[in-house]
Image: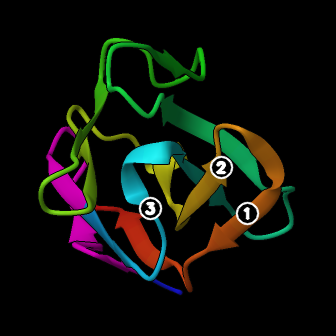
Amino acid sequence: VQIVESGGGLVQPGGSLRLSCAASGFAFSSYIMSWHRQAPGKERELVAAIRSAGGFTNYADSVKGRFTISRDNAKNTVYLQMNSLKPEDTAVYYCNAVNAYNYGYSYWGQGTQVTVSS
């Protein structure tokens, strides 16, 4: 199993970034995919999640209206489009996969750093 995040970096406040999470080694279309983040000194928190069929999404209140999660089951990839970024969005962003039929199967990526600063 491999989960690899990419797309992080340094961006100014108000800017945008698109994170990608490429998965392999499991039945991607059967997994709920989500993005989480962890800022220094804080607990990891859920940012956004998307069901296996892609029809249902949910977001943390702090990112609603600014972030959009999507998935391409043909490419085994999930995305997080982040707009209107704020300094408080600075964190390491992690991709997670959970089997929709057995939550015991859960996989994490290594994370990608997002820094929002002028």
Q: Residues within 10 Å of mark 1 (few under 14, many from 20)?
A: some
Q: Amino acid at mark 3?
A: Ala
Measured Cα–Cα span from mark 3 to mark 2 = 9 Å
Q: Is residue 92 above or below residue 1?
A: above
Residue 105 is left or right of residue 49, and the answer is right
Marking on residue 99: 2
Marking on residue 48: none
**Residue under label 1:** 106
Q: Residues within 10 Å of mark 2 (few under 14, many from 20)?
A: some
Q: Amino acid at mark 2?
A: Asn
Marking on residue 27: 3
Pick whichever, 43 or 36, lies toward us.
36
Is disc 3 placed on a helix, strand or loop?
loop
Question: Residue at the location (40% across, 58% down)?
Answer: 28
Membership of 13 in magenta stretch: yes
Start and end of the magenta stretch? 3-19
Measured Cα–Cα span from mark 2 to mark 1 = 7 Å
User: Residue 101: percent from the left, percent from the top?
Assistant: 71, 38
- Contact check, label 1 and label 3, Cβ < 8 Å: no
Q: Is residue 28 above or below residue 84?
A: below
- Contact check, label 2 and label 1, Cβ < 8 Å: yes
Question: Residue at the location (34% across, 62% down)?
Answer: 117
